[in-house]
Amino acid sequence: MRIGLIVGPWFTVPPEKYGGTERVVDALARALVDAGHEVLLAAASDSTCPVPRIPGFGPSQPDELGLTLSELDHVIKAYRGLGGVDIIHDHTLAGPLYAYRPPAIPVVTTIHGQFTAQSAELYRAMERDTSIIAISNDQRSMFPDLNVAAVIHHGLDLSTVSMGDGLGGYACFVGRMCQDKGLMEAVAVAREAGVPLKIAAKMHAKDEQDFFREVVKPALGPQEEFLGELSDPEKYELMGGAVALINPIQWPEPFGLVMIESLATGTPVVATPMGAAPEIVKHGKTGFLGEVRDLAGFLDTAARLSRADCRRSVDEYFSAGRMAAEHLALYSRILQQFSSKGLPDGGYVEENQRQAS
């Protein structure tokens, strides 16, 4: 199978530091190649993912994150360069709505961002001629009327993550510097439990810098250490030494890649049961889920959970190989419906939805 992957122009694939979508696309691309398929990637020119890439793109543009003109220029070039593939998996928001994409090639898209009433209207516009993937059952449940071809959880390449011993004597928080990620709640939980907290967080955008300056920094004490934004090896070392990852998210996060990264290092997760957290954390086995007021009481018990069980849960349910296999099954089904049945327009999407349900 010849598979075209499109990712936005703002971060490299894989990302140097922050970039959940780009990290997932990198793992997917590598796993698809490992499974014997051809992959052509449309991404920023400074990407290092070891698959063939479409030429003509500029370097990553993190300062232009979310700008429409930047994304539109990128996806037009991407579709122009993907005319020879069998199927296109577009991980941007604008691309599936592009009117001049190759008509004989089916397109799949993944809902990576926050799924709101506003974004649902965009995906309803796409669903006529694009197959849609949700990344969790919780995400899919928000708009049950939307045609979703499959729910496919993210996966992680375990060969890039080593297990830690959890003997660092601290808990950790890893995320973005914003209220939704629950950093201040994590500080409160660690303090109540009497456990030092090490914090790694992305802090590029103005709102992130403002939140740190106005809310977080004045509240930090001697038991909290802010490390800034870490590279993947640094992040995995931090997680591996922690007794637990504290992840008290304050919004229905559609997946939460940080949780499977922590479990891959053997470190259990203590989190609020929002979004997809109950689909990732097995309460009492790979971590604990509860209201913020209950999380401090879970920390000591979490440190005694089996780190091998945490790692095993990722190998069984959240590996890159499993993620690629589920994508390949969907791609094959779409190609069969699209070509052999000759279903016009959104017919293959509707048939896909019928089989998925």
Image: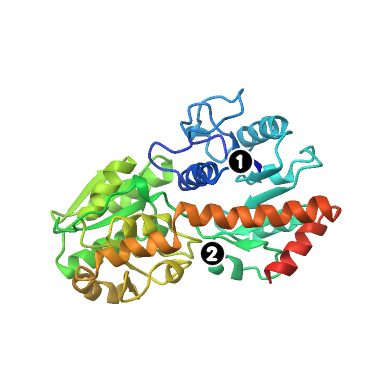
Quadrant of residue 43 in the image?
A: top right
- Which residue is more in the foreground, 97 or 318? 318
Amino acid bearing label 1: Leu
According to the picture, the residue beneath numbered tag 2 turns out to be: 136
Point 60% across, 66% down: residue? 140
Mark closer to the chain start, 2 or 1: 1
- Which residue is more in the foreground, 157 or 173? 157
User: Residue 348 appears at what percent x and percent y?
Assistant: 79, 57
Point 71% across, 57% down: residue? 333
Q: Quarter of the image containing the C terminus? A: bottom right
Residue 160 horizontal side relative to residue 1, left or right: left
Point 56% across, 60% down: residue? 152
Q: Quarter of the image containing the N terminus? A: top right
Res. 283 in view: yes
Amino acid bearing label 2: Ser
Per the model, the C-alpha gap separating discs 2 and 1 is 20 Å
User: Residue 63 appears at what percent x and percent y?
Assistant: 48, 33
Residue 83 horizontal side relative to residue 206, left or right: right
Quadrant of residue 122 in the image?
A: bottom right
User: Crowding at label 2, few (<14), some or many (≥20) Cα neighbours within 10 Å?
Assistant: many
Res. 113 in view: no
User: Residue 173 appears at what percent x and percent y?
Assistant: 29, 56
Above-or-below relation of 176 to 136: above
Above-or-below relation of 150 to 296: above
In the picture, the disc for residue 5 is 1
In the picture, the disc for residue 295 is none
- Which residue is more in the foreground, 57 or 251? 57
Q: Secondary structure at mark 2?
A: loop
User: Residue 188 appears at what percent x and percent y?
Assistant: 24, 65
Residue 328 horizontal side relative to residue 279, left or right: right
Point 13% across, 59% down: residue? 169
- Which residue is more in the foreground, 158 or 195? 158
